[in-house]
Image (tube, rainbow, N blue to C red):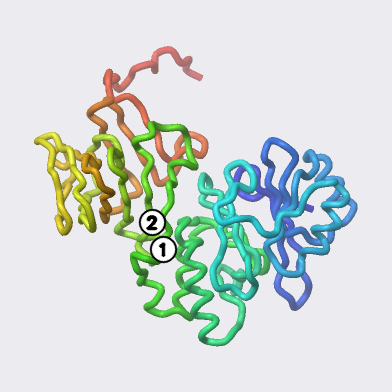
C-alpha cells in the first residue's frame, strides 16, 4: 500500500524483491482525484486505498516497462495516460513536465513540483547505492551526453528526487545528483554556453503581475553546479523592468551588461549603462537598485550575486520587507512578504493570550 512521505500530499509505494533494487510508484493528492505516477501492479488492498483517497484522475508514465500497468489502471478508472508531455507543460496543480535531453529513449521527462523542491524522475536516474544516485549503464560518450542532458533537473534546484528505481532521495538531492553527473561528464558539467541557455518568461507561469515585469530569463548557476553564487541572464524588452526597487541585507550583487543599453535606478540617481559595463550593488542602502530598459532595443544582462539561506530585502517604493528563511516557520512558507511599517513593539499582541 501507499505510505506517507514527509511532503504534503505525496505518497510512496515500493516493491522490493530479494536481490533486486526496489521499484517505486508515487501518488499525488491534488484536491481533485489523485494523480498516479509510474504505476506498478497493485493488490486489492492498494486499489481499495486508492478509491478511499478519491480515485485517480490521470496516470503519468516516466519509466520504461510501466506502460502495461498504466493502461490497466487507466482503463479501470476511465482516465488518460500521460507519457509524452511538452517541455514545461502543466501536468497537475503545481507540477510541470521537464523534458530530458539525450537520454536512452526519446521523450523522457521528469516532473517538477517547485513549491516543495521535489522532482520525480523515472529510470533516467537510479537511487543506488542507498543514499546516492547513479546513471544507467551505457557507453562513455552516451553516458557523458546523458549526464549533460540531465542538467535540466539541476536547474530546478531539487531538495528531493523521487526515483522510479532504487531508493528515493528525500533531502540533499541537488548535491547527490551533481555528484552522479560529474563522474561521467567531468568538468563539462561546469560549463554552458550562452546559446545553450533556456530562456523563457518564467514569471508568466506564476501569479498575475504588471505587464512591464515580464522578461526573458535563463537560470545559469544551478545548471552548472553553483551553490554559493547565483547567476542568471535576463533579456529585457524595451519598456520592461526586471524587478521593483530593492536593497539586500546579505546578498551582494553585480550586473554585467552583455548587450544593449539598460538603466539602473538607485537611491542616488539613475545609471544609463552600455555593453561591457560592470555595476556593483553592495548590501545595505547604497546597493538599492532597480534594473529596467528605457531604450528602444532589447537589453541583456548577466546578474550575479551571493546566495544566502537567510535574507531580507527592503522595497522603498512600497515599504515592503521580504524575509527568506532556510527552514519554514509557518506551514511550507520559506519566504514572507510584509509591510515594513508601522513597526511593532516586541510584546505587541502578547497580552491577549491566556497563560496555560
Residue 169 on image: x %, y %: 57, 61
Residue 189 on image: x %, y %: 41, 73
Q: Which residue is mark 2?
A: 219
- Residue at horizontal 82 percent and vertical 61 percent from the top: 69
Q: Which mark is residue 192?
A: none
C-alpha distance separating marks 2 and 1: 7 Å
Counting every numbered tag in the picture gives 2
Q: Which mark is residue 223?
A: 1
Nearest the eye: 28 or 311: 28
Question: Where is residue 334, by image quadrant?
Answer: top left
Question: Decide: marks 2, 1 in contact (CB < 8 A)?
Answer: yes
Q: Is residue 303 visible?
A: no
How crowded pointer 2 is (Cα within 10 Å; few <14, some 14-19, many 20+) is rated as some
Secondary element type, mark 2: strand
- Residue at horizontal 75 percent and vertical 78 percent from the top: 19
Query: Taking 339 as reference, is 32 above or below it?
Result: below
Q: Is residue 110 left or right of residue 201?
A: right
Work out which residue is located at the far right of the displayed protein and give it.
44
Residue 58 on image: x %, y %: 75, 48
Query: Taking 120 as reference, is 250 above or below it?
Result: above
- Residue at horizontal 38 percent and vertical 34 percent from the top: 211
Work out which residue is located at the far bottom of the displayed protein and give it.
139
Question: Where is residue 85, by image quadrant?
Answer: bottom right
Work out which residue is located at the far left of the displayed protein and give it.
268
Amino acid at each position: 500500500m501507499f505510505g506517507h512521505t514527509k511532503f504534503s500530499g505525496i505518497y510512496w509505494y515500493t516493491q522490493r524483491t530479494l536481490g533486486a533494487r526496489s521499484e517505486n510508484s508515487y501518488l499525488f493528492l491534488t484536491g481533485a482525484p489523485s494523480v498516479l505516477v509510474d504505476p506498478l501492479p497493485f493488490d486489492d488492498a492498494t486499489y481499495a486505498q486508492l478509491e478511499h483517497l478519491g480515485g485517480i484522475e490521470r496516470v503519468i508514465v516516466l519509466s520504461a516497462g510501466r506502460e502495461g500497468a498504466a493502461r490497466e489502471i487507466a482503463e479501470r478508472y476511465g482516465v488518460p495516460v500521460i507519457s509524452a508531455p511538452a517541455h514545461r507543460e502543466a501536468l497537475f496543480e503545481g507540477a510541470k513536465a521537464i523534458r530530458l535531453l539525450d537520454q536512452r529513449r526519446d521523450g523522457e521527462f521528469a516532473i517538477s513540483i517547485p513549491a516543495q523542491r521535489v522532482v520525480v524522475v523515472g529510470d533516467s536516474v537510479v537511487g543506488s547505492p542507498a543514499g546516492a544516485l547513479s546513471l544507467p549503464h551505457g557507453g562513455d560518450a552516451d553516458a557523458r551526453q546523458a549526464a549533460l542532458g540531465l542538467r535540466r533537473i539541476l536547474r530546478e534546484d531539487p531538495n528531493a528526487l523521487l526515483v522510479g528505481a532504487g531508493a528515493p532521495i528525500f533531502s540533499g538531492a541537488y548535491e547527490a545528483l551533481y555528484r552522479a553527473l560529474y563522474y561521467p561528464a567531468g568538468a563539462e558539467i561546469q560549463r554552458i554556453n550562452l546559446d545553450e541557455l533556456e530562456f523563457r518568461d518564467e514569471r508568466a507561469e506564476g501569479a498575475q503581475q504588471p505587464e512591464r515585469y515580464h522578461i526573458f530569463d535563463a537560470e545559469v548557476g544551478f545548471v552548472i553546479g553553483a551553490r554559493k553564487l547565483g547567476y542568471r541572464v535576463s533579456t529585457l524588452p524595451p519598456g520592461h523592468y526586471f524587478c521593483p526597487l530593492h536593497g539586500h541585507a546579505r546578498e551582494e550583487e553585480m550586473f554585467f551588461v552583455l548587450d544593449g543599453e539598460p538603466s539602473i535606478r538607485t537611491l542616488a540617481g539613475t545609471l544609463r549603462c552600455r555593453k561591457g559595463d560592470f555595476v556593483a550593488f553592495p548590501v545595505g542602502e547604497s546597493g538599492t537598485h532597480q534594473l529596467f530598459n528605457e531604450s528602444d532595443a532589447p537589453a541583456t544582462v548577466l546578474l550575479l550575486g551571493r546566495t544566502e539561506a537567510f535574507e531580507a530585502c527592503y522595497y522603498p517604493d512600497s515599504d515592503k520587507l521580504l524575509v527568506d528563511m532556510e527552514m519554514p516557520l509557518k506551514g511550507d512558507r520559506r519566504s514572507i512578504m510584509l509591510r515594513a511599517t508601522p513597526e511593532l513593539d516586541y510584546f505587541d499582541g502578547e497580552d491577549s493570550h491566556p497563560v496555560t
